[in-house]
Image (cartoon, helix red, strand yellow):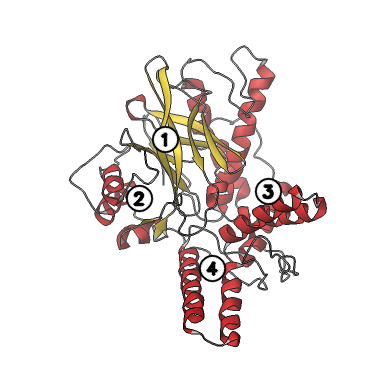
Amino acid sequence: MSSFLLHSAAFAALLVSPLTNSFTLPINHEVTRYSSSWSSTLQAAASADDQQRRPSFQEAGQLDPPSISAAAAQDGIYEQHQQFGDATTDRSNDKDVNSFLRSSEFADLEPLTHSETRSSRLDAENRLRAIYTTAGTDPYWSLRDEIIQLESDLETGRDVGISDEAVSAVRNLLRKAQSKDPEHVYRITSAAAAAAERMGRVEESEKYREESLKARKMLPWFNLEGLWVGKYGTHGFEMINVTYSGDMLIAYKVTGDKNIPRGEISFTADLTPQFEGSASKLDPIVLSENSAKKWGTKKLPRFSGEGHAAEPGYVNNQFLEGQLVVIGEGDYFSFAWIPLEHQIFFGRPSPELTLKMLREGGGTSLTAGLGMSVPGLDAHVKDQTDYVNRCLEVTKDTFLDEWNEGKTDSFSGIWHGNEEECYFE
């Protein structure tokens, strides 16, 4: 099946039905346009008070243009970056936030102390934001449009025979723009690191690898690690744990159902950066004007993947063609099982929701996840506890960071009283 099977009409059909409190969207074949389908779907998913999302971060500085036009020509990639002072983050409400999040499940414990590691990580991320434009945001899509235009101007200029000085000027502008594109830098430096490693240049490879990891941090689809919750149709809400193997995203089921038990893979997505125009690179989804205002971005990146499906009893299990769609800076994402015309939206759970779902997640068989060391039910209790703590630690840090940055509703992903639905922002 073609990796680009999901054209505009088909994908719009996947996204059209009202969400209410369900993040599984059935098909409506009468809708044939992105704008109308995404507008109705995303409007329904927005919070009741229709609050505006926080504007995308505007970069505070520039990186001197390195020569990164090809993997084989990397002479300028290690030019000294502009120095920026340590950014500060107002964390005065950390104690109150932690007390609030832990009040119901951890009433007998003291509030979490402020994490020096998390503070250091946030400062490092702020410095990277001053160098790169965060992918998935409106400034990023504008930057990509600028790069495409400069590439076209450069090619046209060569064809019409403009002067060498003019060609050089356009090329410099192009390199400067590309140096702020984290996906471009990640693709080029990753290729350069691999090439240097093959030639035995260990030190050079490590330098390229370090630069590629910095750029990768500014790609939201590589920052989805941890726990997420989505509604798996009639099975109700289920929890997954996202991890990575290289550029491959892997989502394991933490809670399961009669079709796919917990511990098994729910879906995967190939996030390997592709050159523009590549046959395997999927075009982003263009949102309607109203939806773009609500979600703070005009386009949504998507990636090819495979979704796990099976008959009841885990019979005839197989992987089907799918697509991962990332919303904004990774606040939410969805995965679509294309042949089944089935899509699930995912949001971050709170600690309360995490513990509730782990307690009530059912008794389906827990198997070992590849590369994740998921403990079996017969494993020592310490191994099971450590696994849950690792999942929860990543999720908690992400949730608190986004709350402090004003990107997450205080009640997002928290169960309310005896209600059986989970409300996201």
Mark 4 surroundings within 10 Å by alpha-carbon count, few (fewer than 14), some (14 through 19), many (20 or more): some
Q: Position of residue 374 (x, y in %)?
A: 61, 24
Q: Secondary structure at mark 4?
A: loop
User: What amino acid does circle 2 point to?
Assistant: Ala
Residue 345 appears in the rendering: no
| Nearer to us: label 3 or label 4 | 4
Location of residue 317 with respect to 250 vertically, above or below = above
Marks 3 and 4, how far apart at CA: 22 Å
Q: Nearer the viewer, residue 379 or 271?
A: 271
Going from N to C along the chain, the mark reached first, 1 or 4, is 4
Under mark 3, the amino acid is Arg
Q: Of label 2 and label 1, which has the lower sequence position?
A: 2
- Image disc number at residue 46: 2
Q: Amino acid at mark 1?
A: Gly
Number of marks: 4
Q: Where residue 373 appears, x then y in whole percent?
A: 64, 25
Circle 4 residue = 58
Look at the numbered discs 1 and 4 and tell me whether their residues touch, using CB distance below 8 Å: no
- How far across and down, in percent of the image, does residue 18 sit? 26, 43
Circle 2 sits in a helix, a strand or a loop, which is it? Answer: loop
Q: Is residue 59 left or right of residue 261?
A: right
Per the rendering, the mark at residue 230 is 1
- For residue 158, say whether it is visible: yes
Q: Residues within 10 Å of mark 1 (few under 14, many from 20)?
A: many
- Disc 3 from disc 2: Cα separation: 29 Å
Q: Which residue is mark 3?
A: 118
Farthest top residue in view: 378
Which residue occupies 35% across, 50% down?
A: 46
The quadrant where residue 313 appears: top left
**Crowdedness of circle 3 by 10 Å Cα count: few (<14), some, many (20+)?**
some
